[in-house]
Amino acid sequence: MKFRRENMKTANIEIREMIRKSGVLYWQVAEKIGIADTTFSRKLRHELSNREKTKIGLAVEILKKENEQSEE
């Protein structure tokens, strides 16, 4: 069981770091890509395909720009 938990924590680490550094919240990303926040959290437990990572990365970038514009 311990092995499984370790894998879940390291799955999609680059996506998790990108979201953390951007200042965007997980629920915002989920909403932007059209899924429930709980579904998004479950998806991150296992390594995503490159296509899904790209989709999430684009959503994070859009949200980051939107947040920056609203702060001005």
Image (cartoon, helix red, strand yellow):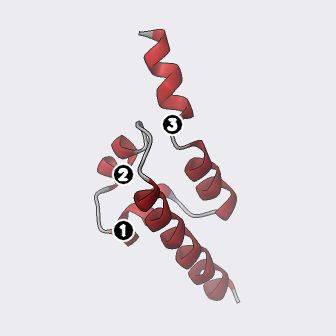
Q: Residue at x 39, y 71 (%)?
A: 32
Q: Residues within 10 Å of mark 3 (few under 14, many from 20)?
A: some
Q: Residues within 10 Å of mark 1 (few under 14, many from 20)?
A: some
The dot on residue 10 is none
Q: Give the distance between the C-alpha atoms of the residues marked 2 and 3, in whole angstroms.
A: 13 Å
Residue for badge 1: 33
- Residue 16: x and y in percent read 57, 48
Q: Marks 2 and 1: in contact by CB < 8 Å?
A: yes
Which quadrant does the C terminus fall into?
A: bottom right
Q: Nearer the viewer, residue 24 or 17?
A: 17
- Residue 65: x and y in percent read 62, 81
Mark 2 or mark 3, which is nearer to you? 3
> In the rendered view, does 18 fall on the left or right side of 49?
right
Amino acid on which disc 2 is placed: Phe
Q: Residue at x 48, y 58 (%)?
A: 53
Residue for badge 2: 40
Task: Determine whether 25 is above or below 5 in the image.
Answer: below
Furthest residue in direction top, as rendered: 1
Amino acid on which disc 1 is placed: Ile
Closer to the chain start, of discs 2 and 3, is: 3
Mark 1 or mark 3, which is nearer to you? 3
- Residue 23: x and y in percent read 64, 62
- Which SS class for mark 1? helix
Residue for badge 3: 11
Q: Quadrant of residue 21?
A: bottom right
Q: Residue at x 49, y 64 (%)?
A: 54
